[in-house]
Image: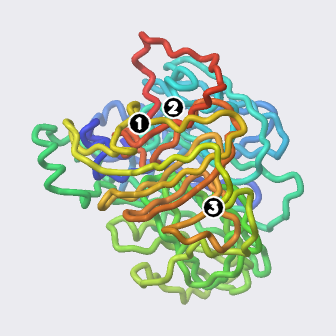
Amino acid sequence: MKKLLLGTVLAGVVAIGAACSNNSSMQGHDMSNMNTKKENTSNESSKQQLPLATNTEVLSGKEINLTAKEALLQINDQVKLPVYTYNGSVPGAQIRVKQGDNVKIVLKNELPEPVTIHWHGYPVPNNQDGVPGVTMDAIKPGETFTYEFTATVPGTYFYHSHQKSAEQVDKGLYGTLIVEPKNEEKVDRDYTLVLDEWMSNPDEGNMDMSGMDQHMSSMGHDMNMYDIFTINGKSGSAVKPLKVKKGEKVRLRLVNAGYMAHKLHLHGHEFKIVATDGQPLKDPQPIKDELLNIAPGERYDIEFIANNPGEWLLECHGDMEGTDGMKVKIQYEDQTNNTDKENAKENLPVVDMTTYGKYEVGSFTLDQKYDVEYTMDLGTAMGKNGMIFTINGKTYPDTAPINVKTGDLVKVKIVNNSPMDVHPMHLHGHFFQVLSKNGKPVTGSPLIKDSLNVNPGEEYVVAFKADNPGNWMFHCHDLHHASAGMVTEVKYTDYKSDYTPDPNDTTNKGE
């Protein structure tokens, strides 16, 4: 499978896996080249029965139908992997709706195991959040479930399974959700690029589990099984170029569905970061030859004017084995000059989002009064069965929840005390404002997010209003870390759920 997990022992450890990617075939959307071939891995006979992955489609309308099913994905000319899909493609269908629309999505499960959909970053009603055992039962094979919500907040989002998510998202179960603003500023090209990592030989994941704890602890956190990085499910020369014409305004929607942060460099052009996690930034300034660090679960919308004819790269910087494959060509139509060169190992500055854009006072400040304050100490430890990832020394479900009531103003201090592990923290159902980093107040545009990357030793203060009643997950979006404990909940004390988990249903695995 995409990246085969080694069971719970490995689930929380060193693995840094991912999900897949998406490009669309509407105006400026390019979701092609998703067919696949055969690879020499196990279960060859069963794989021969699987259909080839199809092009990622764009869906809109009053009712959208998704089917979770298996397929074979051709990542490059050498690697083909069995995957889980929504509608036969990786990434799954792009759902594209307008602000104010009532969204109705009917999900049918044709996979051999239960699934769900979580609307990542979207403030849906709690009973539509798609977390098995918390907001709903997982959808069993052969069953259907209808999700319904109103598209209130425009921007770039994505959706993925929250059932055994470290495994199912790894296998490709995700897609993108685009909510267009009522009065959208038009662009000439609108591309969606989903970042991911894969394992070229999943059979290596089937190694003997005996002695695994000792093996893992001796290897530390340097073990990275994921040796292929992809854009829209393709790697290297298999990534379809992005076509532009001179003078056009181009929007790139960058989505990280994987479990590793990726630093992207746009060659030959200035660009502006116009939104992060779907939320617009105030007066973004032009950037050139700086890296945009995109962490797991994060989305960045960038825009540039195609004013430099030729062929240019958008590429990932770094020196890991898969880095070389995470690049896409930006090709001017009717232009053949290609003088651009890869420079993935060049040391360029990384954009500091806490100083980017124009400062103005947001909804929250550091010194105002809050109804609830919570410190989230993120840690790494060895448990009975391998590495565990903790919040305030505990693993889920024993972590202390953030108890709120509707209308409360909530301040959370997030501190990463893990010596080596990065923790991209994601809050369901709400947006939070980032107020400070390492004790320094944010001096750029108000930074409104739902996913925040916290490196070892870093401390952030964030704030949000408890304005969406329910029980909501707040967890690390390296889903291996979440499955190994790094989860807590925001629990509304004045909310009564109409969902009662079936105590006899052992299939609900909401991590």
Mark 1 or mark 3, which has the lower sequence index? Answer: 3
Residue 46 sits in which quadrant? top left
* In the depicted structure, whether residue 31 falls above or below residue 459: above
**Crowding at mark 1 (Cα within 10 Å: few <14, some 14-19, many 20+):** some
Mark 1 or mark 3, whichever is nearer to me: 3
Give SS at disc 1: loop
The amino acid type of the residue labelled 3 equals Leu
Residue drawn at point x = 69 percent, y = 81 percent: 286
Residue drawn at point x = 75 percent, y = 70 percent: 360
Closer to us: 394 or 146: 394
**Crowding at mark 2 (Cα within 10 Å: few <14, some 14-19, many 20+):** many
Q: Identify the residue position indicated by label 2 in the image.
A: 69
Could one spot residue 427 in this view of the protein?
yes
Mark 1 or mark 2, whichever is nearer to me: 1
75 with respect to 89 (left or right): left
The image position of residue 287, as x and y in percent, is 64, 81
The image quadrant where one finds the C terminus is top left
**Crowding at mark 3 (Cα within 10 Å: few <14, some 14-19, many 20+):** some
Mark 3 or mark 2, which has the lower sequence index? Answer: 2
Q: Identify the residue position indicated by label 1 in the image.
A: 399
Closer to us: 53 or 437: 437
Q: Identify the residue position indicated by label 3 in the image.
A: 366
Give the spatial CA distance, label 1 vs label 3: 26 Å
